[in-house]
């Protein structure tokens, strides 16, 4: 092959590899949300190719090995019921190093599965048997000042502190071993609202923001999602 053609071929291959979108398994279910605006937001990200799975079909797919072909799993569900086989499906994915991104109300999922808290790195506590001061709280429709803790981390790289109209959660648990990425001083929110966790061989990111269309259309939130997904996919 002539040198010029060889270089052109290499450039074409490089461009092709770079242009490959991140394959995302996008999981919802168990909580109402602004459906149209949510999917419009994901379509606007441009560098991802998602397939939507609703619960309980999503967990059945995970237990059946269907998640293996995706680069990243993104959870926007709030689901309670999970079988032992489905739990094992999650654990097997973490042993294989599959990355997860959990958003907003996914922090509430699987109240009866203690291992989920260790996987995610925290838990929204929803238990009527506990004293009121031990339960987590929420507050709709508030302005939240978000502080970026490390603008060199790939999730928040180049980002400034930002403001978002959203829902906050308070008094939820954040495990001591996670790496905080975002925090807020809002009086009705737990301070740390974004973190990175490591579970088995998987990187896990949790972002507390993202309640409704107000958050979905916020440019900083969209940038945060895209950078998180591409970081997890190692593209």
Image (spheres, rainbow, N blue to C red):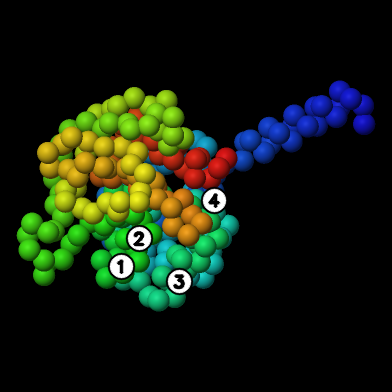
Q: Are marks 1 and 2 in contact (CB under 8 Å)?
A: yes
- Horizontal side of residue 221 vs 166, given as left or right: right
Rendered view: 203 above or below 94 = above
Q: CA distance from mark 4 to mark 3?
A: 19 Å
Mark 4 nearby-residue class (10 Å; few <14, some 14–19, many ≥20): many
Q: What element does badge 1 sit on?
A: helix
* Number of residues whose C-alpha sits closer than 10 Å to that of mark 3, classed few (under 14), some (14–19) or many (20 or more): few
Q: Which residue is mark 2?
A: 118
Percent from the top left, x then y, of residue 6? 85, 29
Query: From where the camera sits, is residue 204 visible?
Result: yes
Residue matched to label 3: 88
Under circle 3, the secondary element is helix
Residue mark closest to the camera, 4 vs 3? 3
* Vertical placement of residue 124 versus 57, above or below: above
Specify the quadrant that holds the N terminus: top right
- The answer for how far apart the CA atoms under marks 4 and 2 are is 22 Å
> Does label 4 or label 1 sit earlier along the sequence?
4
Residue bearing mark 1: 114
Query: Along the line of sight, which residue is nearer the eye, 227 or 61?
Result: 227
Where is residue 180 shown, x and y percent of the image?
Answer: 33, 42
């Amino acid at each position: 092959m002539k040198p010029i053609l060889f270089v052109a071929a290499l450039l074409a291959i490089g461009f092709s590899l770079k242009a490959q979108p991140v394959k995302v398994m996008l999981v919802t279910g168990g909580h109402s949300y602004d459906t149209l605006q949510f999917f419009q937001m994901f379509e606007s990200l441009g560098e991802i190719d998602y397939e939507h799975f609703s619960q309980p079909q999503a967990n059945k797919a995970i237990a059946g090995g269907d998640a293996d072909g995706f680069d990243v799993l993104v959870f926007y569900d709030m689901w309670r019921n999970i079988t032992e086989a489905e739990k094992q499906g999650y654990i097997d994915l973490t042993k294989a190093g599959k990355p997860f991104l959990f958003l907003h109300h996914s922090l509430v999922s699987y109240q009866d599965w203690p291992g989920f808290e260790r996987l995610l790195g925290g838990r929204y506590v929803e238990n009527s048997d506990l004293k009121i001061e031990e339960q987590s709280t929420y507050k709709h429709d508030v302005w939240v000042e978000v502080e970026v803790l490390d603008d060199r981390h790939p999730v928040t790289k180049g980002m400034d502190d930002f403001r978002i109209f959203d829902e906050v959660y308070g008094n939820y648990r954040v495990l001591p071993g996670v790496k905080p990425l975002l925090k807020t001083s809002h009086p009705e929110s737990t301070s740390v609202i974004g973190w990175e966790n490591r579970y088995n061989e998987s990187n896990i990111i949790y972002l507390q923001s993202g309640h409704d269309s107000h958050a979905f259309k916020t440019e900083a939130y969209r940038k945060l999602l895209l950078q998180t997904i591409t970081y997890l996919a190692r593209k």
